[in-house]
Amino acid sequence: MTAGDTGGGSFITFEGGEGAGKSTQIRRLAAHLRAQSGRPVLTTREPGGSAKAEAIREALLSGTAKRYGPFAEALLFSAARIDHLDTLIRPALARGEIVLCDRFTDSTRAYQGAAGGLDPAVLASLEQVVVGQTRPDLTLILDCDPELGLARARARQAAGADEGPDRFEAEALAFHARLRAAFLAIAADEPARCAVVNAALPADAVEAAIRAVVADRLPRLFPNASETVGGHAA
């Protein structure tokens, strides 16, 4: 069951490797949806989004939890997700809002599962307990070559837009290649929920592709029938 199935709000998640441009595209889609849907739009992220979850984020991205292994990391992500869902995401969906989230359960599957070596069955059980029926209506997987994504991340850091590489950005290229394969496998397994977007394209082209997917998959977000890709009338 998804957020839309419950008659509440709409839940869209963004996934992908480091430097795929998720934060930029979330900001752009949020602005577009606010203008076109007439509904409140909440943007958030994982790990984080709520006060307790942000505190856990610091421990995860600093690498403090790494020495305890992928299962301990998965537990911390789950603890953050519980608070995030209870205090922010579920209340917003219940109010009928559109929620755009930078990473969600698929990142745990990819990072701690496929790339970290944790048993997928363990993650599936943990996910069922933590998430329950609060599933995304749509997941946009921003895909690009890991070398390109990491180069973008380094460029942001050099420009002062980001701090130095976090616990995951600092992993070897092979780790990031496994991440990419994991996200693409998730998309192949769940095509009704997931859509892969070529994130190697310029930001404007990626934005247009995302708008096209959202308009096609979630037409209820656009009460005006003339809504089309790029904001131009048909």
Image (tube, helix red, strand yellow):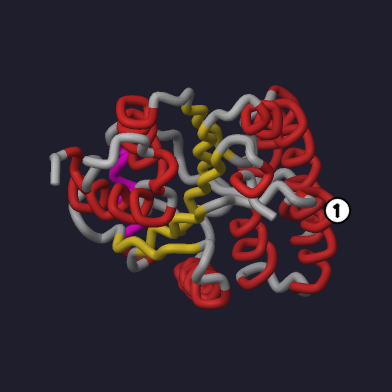
Residue 151 forms part of the magenta stretch: yes
Q: Nearer the viewer, residue 218 or 48?
A: 218
Give neighbour class at mark 1: few <14, some 14-19, many 20+ (Cα, 10 Å): few
Give left or right: position of 69 versus 15.
right
Q: Is residue 44 visible?
A: yes
Above or below residue 120? Residue 126 is above
Q: Residue at x 54, y 32 (%)?
A: 44
Image location (x, y in percent) of residue 194 = 49, 63
Image location (x, y in percent) of residue 59 = 70, 38
Q: Magenta stretch: dominant SS?
A: helix
Q: Residue at x 35, y 47 (%)?
A: 21
Element on which disc 1 rests: helix
Where, quadrant-wise, is the N terminus in this rendering? bottom right
Above or below residue 86? Residue 146 is below
Residue 217 forms part of the magenta stretch: no
Image location (x, y in percent) of residue 210 = 32, 51
Image location (x, y in percent) of residue 3 = 63, 45
Give left or right: position of 131 versus 171.
right
Name the image quarter holding residue 55.
top right
Q: Residue at x 74, y 38 (%)?
A: 80
Give left or right: position of 83 versus 205.
right
Q: Is residue 160 visible?
A: no
Q: Which residue is mark 1?
A: 129
Q: Residue at x 61, y 59 (%)?
A: 106
Q: Which residues are magenta?
A: 148-158
Q: Nearer the viewer, residue 137 or 82?
A: 137
Name the image quarter holding residue 74.
bottom right
**Residue type, numbered disc 1:** Val
Q: How many marks?
A: 1
